[in-house]
């Protein structure tokens, strides 16, 4: 015997209006008393739900081999959310997605931490069946902040950086990168109620190559992707100095010719103090220094020595040296002549070696052919001998051959 749909809805509405909606179990048992439930082969199916705070969670209560028994969904406090397609609970965030004899699917919008827990699916067979699904709410970090111990560091110093991810659930994992290189930090976790705050500390020794390089704090958390923040390193370093020769561009520094040098220096902050000096001696009077340039218009051997460019900034001082050796005025020409002579001699030697190799090859081939002919004449007649003794006699030069042996007397 089945109870009509009209009676079910009328009695359920009356129960809700009378404030007994949270104790529908007794009413349903009374309603089910007039109905025969066949529970053989029926079973409930559901899955746990994981959702990010503020998103939508969908709960599905499904029945395999349904016989049109009543499906109900209850919240963690065992209050009825949906009875069939009717919602007695006054929470508009719950909405019916699908209702049939084999499924009750409900969505919960704007999920918060308070919604986390077990939700019960009930099937009113005889005896009744019940299973539960668990809603887990993930909370991404509220803020991600990097604090640097010193805004501006000096090369060689070790600085401390801290990255904090606040109010997440579960606790987040923090990773550090300098440019594309991953670094290792040390993390501490603090729990406040159901939330976790994670702080990771990174100790970093900086050099001039780190100036302007980003340090990245990246979060690994199931509720968020690609969450990161970064700070650019500012590193001060002493000057890097280089001396270049403008004239002569190539070749020797010879007597009577000019010499021009330029000093360049880079540092942070940019060097403001730059000067030329002669190491272990006084600067010649005819040397002209103009800013970063040094000019000697007429070189002579008294100018030989080491010339140094010094540059300094707030971090420190650096220098670069240029060693000057003045050659005789004809040093370059003599060197060129010697180079030509060496080239000619080398060419002659190569031709002679090649000719000797060719001669050796020709002589080798000639001796090889001559040696073969000699053996052939010496063994002449051995092939025509009647026996081995005769062959030996013939091979030894034919001593018994009287026709080939002639004597002349005068």
Image (cartoon, rainbow, N blue to C red):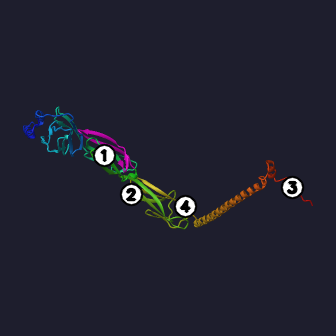
Q: Quadrant of the C terminus?
A: bottom right
Tag 1 or tag 2, which sits nearer the N-term? 1
Q: CA distance from mark 3 to mark 1?
A: 117 Å
Relative side of 330 to 245, left or right: right
Residue extending farthest to the front is: 386
Compared to 219, does 266 lie above or below?
A: below
Report the residue marked by disc 4: 325
Mark 4, secondary structure of its residue:
loop
Residue on which the image places disc 3: 402
Assign a secondary structure to mark 2.
loop
Determine whether, in the image, residue 398 is placed left or right of residue 9: right
- How dense is the environment of label 2, judged by Cα within 10 Å: few (below 14), some, or many (20 and up)? some
Task: Return the disc, 3 or 1, that comes first in the chain's sequence.
Answer: 1
Q: Which residue is mark 1?
A: 219
| Picture coordinates of residue 246, whole percent (x, y) | 48, 64
Element on which disc 3 rests: loop
User: Mark 2 sits on what residue?
Assistant: 270
């Amino acid at each position: 015997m089945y109870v009509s749909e009209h009676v079910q809805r009328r009695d359920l509405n009356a129960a809700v209006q009378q404030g007994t909606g949270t104790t529908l179990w007794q009413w349903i048992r009374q309603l089910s008393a007039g109905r025969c439930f066949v529970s053989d082969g029926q079973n409930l199916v559901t899955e746990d739900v994981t959702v990010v705070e503020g998103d939508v969670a969908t709960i599905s209560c499904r029945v395999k081999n349904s016989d049109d028994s009543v499906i109900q969904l209850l919240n963690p406090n065992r209050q009825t959310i949906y009875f069939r397609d009717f919602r007695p609970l006054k929470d508009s965030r719950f909405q019916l997605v699908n209702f049939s004899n084999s499924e009750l699917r409900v969505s919960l919008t704007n999920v918060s931490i308070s919604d986390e827990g077990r939700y019960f699916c009930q099937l009113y067979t005889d005896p009744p069946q019940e299973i539960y699904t668990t809603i887990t709410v993930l909370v991404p970090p509220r803020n991600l902040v990097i604090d640097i111990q010193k805004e501006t560091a000096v090369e060689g110093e070790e600085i401390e950086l801290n990255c904090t991810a606040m109010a997440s659930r579960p606790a987040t994992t923090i990773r550090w990168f300098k440019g594309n290189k991953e670094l290792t930090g040390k993390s501490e976790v603090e729990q406040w109620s159901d939330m976790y705050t994670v702080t990771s500390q990174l100790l970093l020794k900086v050099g001039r190559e780190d100036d302007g390089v980003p340090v990245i704090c990246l979060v690994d958390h199931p509720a968020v992707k690609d969450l990161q923040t970064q700070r650019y390193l500012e590193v001060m370093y002493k000057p890097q100095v280089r001396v270049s020769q403008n004239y002569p561009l190539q070749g020797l520094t010879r007597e009577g010719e000019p010499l021009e040098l330029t000093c360049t220096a880079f540092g942070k902050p940019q060097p403001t103090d730059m000067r030329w000096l002669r190491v272990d001696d006084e600067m010649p009077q005819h040397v002209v220094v103009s800013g970063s340039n040094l000019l000697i218009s007429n070189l002579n051997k008294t100018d030989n020595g080491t010339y140094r460019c010094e540059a300094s900034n707030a971090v420190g001082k650096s220098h670069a040296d240029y060693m000057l050796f003045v050659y005789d005025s004809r040093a370059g020409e003599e060197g060129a002549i010697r180079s030509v002579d060496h080239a000619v001699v080398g060419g002659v030697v190569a031709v002679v070696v090649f000719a000797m190799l060719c001669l050796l090859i020709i002589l080798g081939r000639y001796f090889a052919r001559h040696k073969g002919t000699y053996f052939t004449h010496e063994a002449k007649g051995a092939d025509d001998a009647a026996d081995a003794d005769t062959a030996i006699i013939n091979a030894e030069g034919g001593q018994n051959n009287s026709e080939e042996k002639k004597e002349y007397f005068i």
